[in-house]
Image (tube, grey):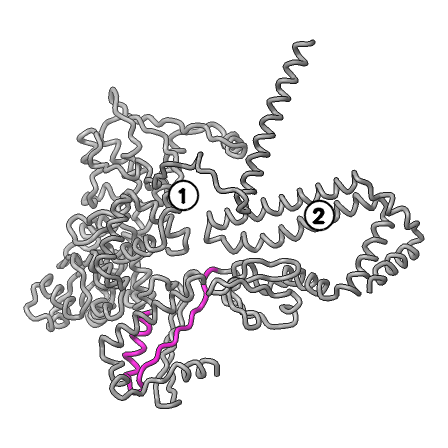
Amino acid sequence: MLLGSRAALATAGASLTKAQRAAGRIALRFLVYIGWRSAPTIGKVEVVTRPFLPREYATDLRAKELPAIYRRLFRFEAVQDFRFLVGREVEMEAIAQARAFWEAGRPVALVIVGERGSGKTSLINCALKRSLEDLEVLRGEFKERLVSDSQLREFLAEMFGVEDPNDLEKFLNGQRRIVIIEELERAFLRQVGHFESIRALQRLIAATCNSTLWILITNQVAYKFLDASVSMGQGFSHRINAASVRRDDLREAVLLRHNLSGLRLQFALPPERRGFFNRWKGKLRGEADPDKIFFEALAKESAGVFRSAFNIWLSQIEGVEAGVLYMKPLVPPDLSPVIDDLKLADLFTLVAILQHGSLTPEEHATVFQKSRAASRAQIDELLAREIIEQDPGRSGYRVRPEALRVVREALYRRNLL
Amino acid sequence: MNAVPIVSVGLALQDLSMNPIEILTKISARNVLYGVLVLVVTYLLVRVSQSLLETLSRRAPRARFFFKLLSPVFRFFLWIAGTVIVLTIFAPSRETLLAVLASVGIALGLGAQDLVKNLIGGLVILIDRPYQLGDRVKIGDAYGEIDHIGLRSTKLTTPDDTRVTIPNSDILSGKAWNANSGVPDCQVVTDLFVPHDTDPTEVIGIGAEAAYSSPYVLLSKPVVVLLQDHFQDGPYMTVRVKAYVYDHRFEPRLQSDITQRAKAEFLRRGMLLRWSRHDQAPSSEDLRAEEEA
């Protein structure tokens, strides 16, 4: 009895001491706030680290240890084989319909819009083997930045093998053929007086779409900008949105590749979520199916974009053991610290990079009316944050495919997308 | 003047056949302590709710206006609830409560008409919602972003970072111009000036491209460019660029950016040379007078 009351007294004493300390801290904060006391230096954070991208967003997946066949099956290239094209039946049908219109003598121009890695090139590769076969095809890509009428004409003349750039209309109206040009986002620069080439292209398409079936390919952000600024959409009879696919299509595309590897698949269950509501949500859902949970999270995280989905899939591979591929559970990381750390200038730069495909420091300086040194510094900062990288095969810097999710979310949150 | 509230309390109690001593008996040290405690808890709840809504609006900027809309409503209802609880502590019977309310009402009605007008104005603003927190408004000659809607007054911060307090009664009787009405974007008008004989087609193109090139512009809404000739102290042409900014906080920046881009292009094409040669540019006083007109 005596021992019990002593223990109770000791507990009460400890609680009182805690309460006294808490009250002391509050009083001190108040005194510091009103300037009665100076702020204490002890207890300040000595080291402040910038928020880093989560590991799976920053790792170069090409350098990851993976079985050789897996590396080949999930390589970052456009699909050539029709069997690997998944979830694009509606788009293929639209291309076939566009050709039928054009064959009937109607003017047709087609634009395919989708995010980088969403399968636009794959779609056109497969369409060329199906609905667009047995036709003369001239195919190219805007690799360099074009801003003037003459630059565009020279580029097209070289692509078509026409000697005089002023004879383009004559050449295109002379014979029925298909012209496919990718990376339309490189045919302008967002600055006054730098829209000449895209306007010249619009005029050329309008003048020749009776004889030439134009197919242009661009990304979503660029198309939105061009449609607003130069009414790009009005010049096309068909617009195909190859933006995102459904969860089942993503699952099919991933498993189609995986099954060819001959490996069995083992998913891990995600760790039990904390919090009252999450526990109840889990209970209401019933028994967890790790396969379903994984692909639901994959579709959400990749926003239905094939390349993002493949990136995430590869990053979630735990290892291969005795013919079984073990997958880590896909738990979306909290991106808020990284997103909140991006300044307005960073976000504007990222929007501009998405609108233009990629940007060199000189182009950045033109777009933002800055000095070249200031633009270089801005780009270097984003490079150091692992958000952009040198665009392979082209001049300028692009958003890293792995970081695209973070960028998309950051821009969406600020009403910039 | 001081006799008015005392007389009104007496009249109210007389009407309800109450003993005035009954109220005084309810004012004990314990009741006062409870009352203060309730007010402190209410204050803390108000602070917590405001802080929570502020955090939510920062976390989800697209829903910023929704959370800001809730902010004054929460504050208002929490204070009402706190006041009712305090009144019930001091007024155990319905009659006493009514007597106190009646007397306070009469006293306020006679002695603090302006305060009552402001309080009613605050209520009307909450219900009628001519603007909400975060809106960019012009009230009288004050222009800026609303950052506080209280029962007595509304506060806004001007683009020059000056806080203006406007009594709610003034808002009730005057006009309030709202630029965005609960959405982040708003229209921004930018005036550019060029010599009167400049090619209009070229100028319209430059104005539109300058707007679309700006990172602050909202692409989902149209850009309109209008021209007008003026002949005050020499002819000149106004190029009015109407564009939407994606977040109204950047209104001055969009104006400045459009002006910078367009002016750079005017200079590059030699459009402003005629002014520098003939010295026909309108003076700043003329432009200000024109704008006011």
Considering depth in this image, is A224 or B40 the residue closer to the camera?
B40
Q: Residue at coordinates 69% horizontally, 61% vertically from top-left?
A: B119
Q: Is residue B161 magenta?
A: no
Image quadrant containing the N terminus of chain B: bottom right
Q: Which mark is residue B141?
A: none
Circle 2 residues within 10 Å: few <14, some 14–19, many ≥20: some
- Callout 1: helix, strand or loop? helix
The residue located at (20%, 34%) in the rendering is A63
Q: Nearer the viewer, residue B175 or A214?
A: B175
Chain of the residue on which disc 2 is drawn: B
Q: Secondary structure at mark 2?
A: helix
Residue type at tag 1: Ser
The segment highlighted magenta reads B184-210
Amino acid type at image mark 2: Ala
- Whether the magenta-drawn stretch holds residue B208 is answered as yes
Label 1 sits on residue: A336
Please state the total of marks drawn on the protein image.
2
User: Residue sitting at 47 percent across and 31 percent down?
Assistant: A273
Is residue A310 shown to the viewer in this render?
no
Residue A266, given in percent of the width and then of the height, sits at 33, 25
Q: Tell me if B170 is positioned left or right of A191 in this view.
A: right
Name the spot of residue B278 as percent of width and height, x first.
Answer: 27, 88
| Rendered view: A170 above or below A239 | below
Chain of the residue displaying label 1: A
The residue to which callout 2 is attached is B81
Residue B153 position in % (x across, y down): 63, 62
Is A370 in front, or is B165? Answer: B165
